[in-house]
Image (cartoon, rainbow, N blue to C red):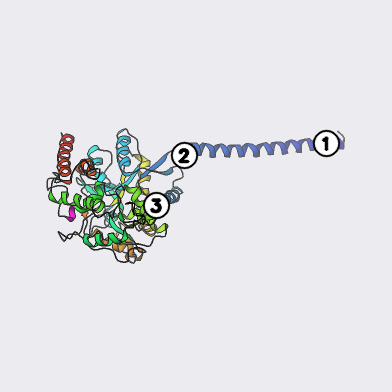
Amino acid sequence: MSFPQLKADKNIFANKNQIIKKWVTIIHHIVIILIITIGCAQKTEKIVVWTSMRPLERQLLDSLLHEFSTTYPQYRFVQLFYAPEEARTNFIISSLAGKGPALIHGANDNIGPFVELGVIQPMEDYFSQSELDEFLDDPFPANTYFKGHLYQVADRVGNHLCLVYNKKLVKKPPQTMHELIEMGKKLTVDENGDGRPERYAIAWNYTEPFFFVPFITGYGGWLFDDQYRPTLNTEATKKAAQLIYDLVNKYKIMPKEADYEIANALFKDGLAAMIINGPWSWSTYLKNNIPIGIARIPKIDETGLWPAPLVSPMGYSLNKNLTGEKLQVTVKLLKFLTSDSVQLRFTKLSGSIPSRKTAFKDSLVQNNEIIRAALDQLLVGRPMPVITEMRWIFDAMRPAYQGIFTGQVTPEEAVEQMQKLAEKLIRENRE
């Protein structure tokens, strides 16, 4: 073989080797892509959290779930929003069907129905006693036990109604209902005299039972007796209903129609000087640059009692269907979401009151004017009963109570109807 021929053959072999190397590189890349693709395809296991948080808090929750996901890349961590009533109903249905989210976040008045229907599981075995001792027990227990078991781990306490006022319009909040009425006459403005004020003194979701309860307690009433039998047909309930009716129709310092969204919009737009609302709303007002102050709901002059809003912790419960590794990861997520640092991030964002002792003592909480005022209202609140009857009581109150404001019934007739329906619902559901 001549030298030129040998050189040509070497070139052929060199070219073949280069081609082979190129194909090996391509195949290697394809394998890597396939591995990644298969891995992504396998990463379909989701850990879902259901929540009723307001938009700003949901944004923070999203970022926290993303932060936590870096430790467990085999899972997708997502959250879904449901209004409180929808969340409870949908969770019960889905959990009974063997599905549903891993965690549900909400107020602890859901615990009674959830436990009785067997849709959540006890959690005391997943926490050491030292871990549980880190949560508040004064002035109200943070975590929720029912029938001897831990069913909710709190990330905040309170969830209670307060008087919120716009400092541009109200220099000093009213201390009594008489002061509210007198101040309200000046704050309510009807510029064109058409009988529809351009600005109201106060607005709130007054036709919803949760927002009605503080006034019942202000007149010395309550929802149950010691045996959890309804006590709605009382002078206290009747007088409370009459007071709110008069604020709307006699004194005309409140709008005749005001569900939650309407009242919220009026306050945000400066068309209501005050509103009765809870901690979940404050971040929205602050984001809208409203200089808010927080105070107790004004005292009832006749009784000398402060209205006592329902007070409850908010937190997370575990779906009964969780098992194995997914359960273990969810418990770790739960501990992360209720940690000191995470609770303080929510406090900084929305003014929520932490459920852990160390976070509660932090200067971010203790030096916050809004939180301290909310704590002052909390001190005269009533703990939310963790019983299923609570749901039936609210359901029984709603139709007759709302009928007062549509002219269908008088307060006297309404309280009788509430009592009868409450007794009927409890009897039928307990049979």
Disc 3 or disc 1, which is closer to the eye? 3
Identify the mark at residue 8; answer none if there is no mark. Answer: 1
Q: For the residues marked 3 and 2, what is the alpha-carbon distance in whole angstroms?
A: 27 Å
Q: Amino acid at mark 3?
A: Glu
Q: Which image quarter: residue 308? A: bottom left
| 48 vs 210, nearest the viewer | 210
Q: For the residues marked 1 and 2, what is the alpha-carbon distance in whole angstroms?
A: 52 Å
Q: Which image quarter: residue 291? A: bottom left
Q: Position of residue 410 (x, y in %)?
A: 18, 44
The residue tagged with tag 2: helix, strand or loop?
loop
Which segment did they paint magenta?
Answer: 216-221
Label 3 neighbour load within 10 Å: few <14, some 14-19, many 20+: some
User: Going from the N terminus, do you reach mark 3 or mark 1 first?
Assistant: 1
Label 1 neighbour load within 10 Å: few <14, some 14-19, many 20+: few
Q: Position of residue 67 (x, y in %)?
A: 45, 51
Q: Would you name the residue on which mark 3 appears?
A: 57
Q: Amino acid at mark 2?
A: Lys
Q: Is residue 127 visible?
A: no
Q: Residue furthest front?
A: 193
Q: Residue at x 83, y 38 (%)?
A: 7
Q: Are marks 3 and 1 in contact (CB under 8 Å)?
A: no
